[in-house]
Amino acid sequence: MFPLSGATPRLWLPPPVSATEQGLPMSRTNAPATTDAPPKVDSPLTHGLKQRHLSMIALGGVIGAGLFVGSGAGIAAAGPSIVLAYGISGALVMLVMRMLGEMSAANPASGSFSVHAERAIGPWAGFTAGWSFWVLLCVAVGLEGIGAAKIVTGWLPGTPEWAWVALFMLVFTATNLAAVKNFGEFEFWFAALKVAAITLFLVLGLLAIFGVLPDTSAPGTSNLTGEGGFLPNGSEGLVLGLLASVFAYGGLETVTIAAAESEKPVQGVARAVRTAMWRIAVFYIGSMAVIVTLVPWNDKTVVEKGPYVAALDHMGIAHAGQIMEVIVLVALLSAMNANIYGASRMAYSLVDRDQGPKALGRISGGVPRVAVLCSSVFGFGCVLLSYWRPDDVFPWLLNMIGAVILVVWIFIAVSQLLLRRRTEREAPQTLVVKMWLYPGLTWVALAAMAAIFVLMARQSDTRDQLLATGVMTVVLAVLGYARQRMKARQAA
């Protein structure tokens, strides 16, 4: 898509920064043993997130509204093979998280993969990855605000939707303007509710599968092999399910951003990454298996009401729809909170590395408050566009962010491929998390990402997303490369 060659010249990087200057405790995992140190980041930020905050952010970060609602379209397309689709995409996400965890444990930073891309590939790569992710998060904040407002106006008809969006934006902007521990507390309880809800769903689902629940009989494999079999729509249906499942995993990266402001950044990242496998297996693949075992894949309620509501209705759980609406609302509000946080920290990190307007880098009380406000305003602007220009500008904006997460994953994989050898040579003691079977599995992940791009290009409904994301990525890459060349000439 764009050139990736060329190691980072010395003139692009500031002098090495000690662990003390970065605000990190000196230990064997972050001692300044490398001469190719990362750019100075995060020193003015506080370390107000406790380990319990980080653990729950990691646990609840994989449970989003896309899982509760969006998975219905994937089931309708793939049938029972949606379990296989989520398994394949989940395996890819595990590899990406392992690569990101390796780099983030060695060098915790609020810029996360943007910082790693800058070190590995060059400033243009950090610029491109960082600002594209910032746009993705800001637009997502607007989408989540709209979704949450629609749920509340359904409960309170006659109340204006925009007023609820404004209220949610004000609450979470205020939360993020305060000390980072407030963000951590909100996310802790949001995540706890989501984890409790999906755990209860899985327990009830297993009881229903075995015919233990009252008024239920064990379905056996009838829904998995009947109605067209495990692959009712063939490989094409599996491909559509795969594409739907890939983008449901977005948001896992936030934990590596938050880890930089935790009490023990290195240990926090390592623990989150090491538990990613069972979290993905249980919450995503496990719940999909429960749903398609209990409910026929072509049941209209799977799409109309959502797969979880359809499964709860099948189990005879009273008020299933209302229960799921509350859970989806919590998931949306949690995502709003996390995305404002992630966007503000990414913007701050970019500015701290001289990759954006200086005003965004102002710190007050250990919080980048100008970056928080700008990220929130952009998100609210997306909401206004959904009202003012619902037929042209807003759909274009949605298409523009459609494949950003894949672009970010590619930067992560390429960065890890380049940084691993450098770290083994210069600071091997910082590799407290290691990518499995390096470099083989890194190349496998890159090949899988390329295959997903090809699959997206083949589908008419995802082709526009691919094109719009590609245009935005190329524009950012050109801007970033131009800035890099200009600074190189000035330094010379």
Image (tube, rainbow, N blue to C red):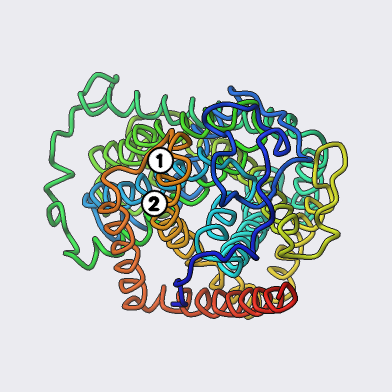
Image location (x, y in percent) of residue 289: 26, 39
- Residue under numbered circle 2: 421
Q: Name the residue at 58% across, 40% down.
A: 108
**Label 2 – label 1 distance at C-alpha:** 45 Å
Q: Is residue 488 left or right of residue 431?
A: right
Question: Of callouts 2 and 1, which one flags the residue occurring earlier in the amino acid sequence?
Answer: 1
Q: Residue at x 33, y 68 (%)?
A: 450
Quadrant of the image occupied by residue 187: top right
Give SS at disc 2.
helix
Instruction: Assess disc 2: are there few (<14), some (14-19) or many (≥20) residues with their C-alpha within 10 Å of its C-alpha.
Output: some
Question: Which quarter of the figure is the N terminus placed in?
Answer: bottom left
- Quarter of the rendering containing residue 241: bottom left
Between 463 and 303, the residue placed more toward the observer is 463
Q: In this rendering, does residue 9 appear at all?
A: yes
Report the residue marked by disc 1. 308
Residue drawn at x 42%, y 53% is 416
- Given residues 319 and 15, the one toward you in this image is 15
* Amino acid found under the numbered disc labelled 1: Tyr
Q: Secondary structure at mark 1?
A: helix
